Image: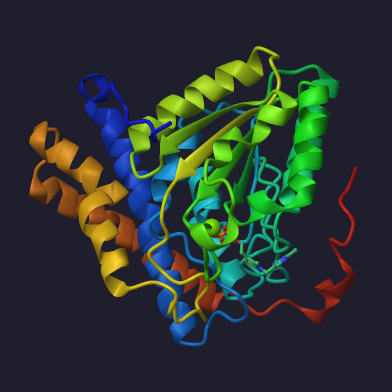
Amino acid sequence: MAAKKTTKKANVSKDELLSYYKDMLLIRRFEEKAGQLYGMGLIGGFCHLYIGQEAVVVGLEAATKEGDKRITSYRDHGHMLACGMDPKGVMAELTGREGGYSKGKGGSMHMFSKEKHFYGGHGIVGAQVPLGAGLAFSDKYRGNDNVTFTYFGDGAANQGQVYEAFNMAALWDLPVIFVIENNEYAMGTSMARSTSSPDIYTRGAAFGIKGEVVDGMDVLAVKEASEKAVAHCRAGKGPYILEVKTYRYRGHSMSDPAKYRTREEVQKMRDERDCIEQVRDMLLTGKHATDDDLKAIDKEIKATVNEAADFSKESPEPSLDELYTDIYAEA
Ligand SMILES: Cc1ncc(C[n+]2csc(CCOP(=O)(O)OP(=O)(O)O)c2C)c(N)n1
Ligand SMILES: [Mg+2]
């Protein structure tokens, strides 16, 4: 099955295209700024950037409603911004400050928002997959029609716990979408070197879980697939797998020199497939926006990101009194 291209481009409204454009650009500019702050020594520890993968989370979020949940790995800043978390709180967590979502005690990989139903941020590869099934179980138990989006990578997809979660999710018809963000690499290991069957979307077949592969550089294709998967889950038909083919432009984390692939490979993807450029082209060729309009949007987004960066520098270091707070969640 080839990754699906969207068929509905002609019907997309100007407002819809602009909103995807802005949401993806916010993630990209935010991540570029995070990279700079890391370089300046203001962000410590691990920092995994999402640049290149923006269409995945923006397309998937387009089909959500209030109450839906999301959980992901350590490559999580884009997911937080896409579900409406405040860039200031995310950036201040990256710099380990009091104004951060985890009061500066979690850092890049450990942020949560009850209000936005964002359940982290997990550094242990694959750990979020059974947790995501558990979140979906809670909604099934409560009898509502919420859906949980459980994101994980191509590398995580080779883990045993993923299949235990698949089994239970299928057995109990849990409303969970397993989103496999296939960016072709797990740290420095390519899919070709690690994975016997490259069609990851078929991995649920043994459990009777439907799977689909989507072009993750095309936000409209992702949104279309997301709507279909969401409808399946909300109708009580159980879990769904979406393998979203994407690509990360930066290294695995900020400390990765990326010697396992060529510069040309990355440049080709940027030049030919970039998700933001694709929407930019649609906006310009469809005469929905001029070059100046798009420059103004970029300026506005850069201002939001700069404000977040300033906040993340000015917010104080966490007080020692906070050391033993927030250890257990309130019931
Ligand atoms: C259980 C476990 N094993 C190994 C690691 C080290 N590790 C961190 S990220 C990673 C690769 C995961 O790749 P993938 O699932 O494709 O996600 P991506 O980083 O590409 O988003 C590994 C092996 C870990 N954090 N946890
Ligand atoms: Mg990967």
Location of residue 183 in the rendering, given as x and y in whole percent from the top left corner: 47, 54
Q: Is residue 210 visible?
A: yes
**x then y, percent, for residue 181:** 52, 48
Residue 202: image quadrant is top right
Q: Residue furthest bottom?
A: 41
Q: Residue shown at 51%/78% (left/top)?
A: 313
Quarter of the rendering occupied by the C terminus: top right
Up/down of 302 relative to 201, above or below: below
Residue 185 in sight in this render: no
Indicate whether 198 appears above or below 8. Answer: below
The total of numbered circles placed on residues is: 0
Answer with left or right where residue 19 lies relative to residue 44. Answer: left
* For residue 89, side relative to residue 40 (left or right): right
Q: Position of residue 301 (x, y in %)?
A: 32, 56
Front position in the image: 61 or 223: 223
Quick check: which quadrant has ligand 1?
bottom right
Q: Residue 100 location, x and y as percent? A: 63, 65
Q: Residue furthest top?
A: 235
Rendered residue at 62%/61% (across/down): 74
Q: Residue at x 20, y 21 (%)?
A: 10
On screen, residue 59 versus residue 278, left or right, reads: right
Question: In which image quadrant can residue 2 be found?
Answer: top left
Q: Check the image and report above or below for 138 versus 306.
A: above
**269 relative to 57, above or below:** below
Task: Specify the color scheme.
Answer: rainbow
Q: Residue at x 33, y 73 (%)?
A: 262
Q: Considering the image in quadrants, where does the N terminus appear? A: top left
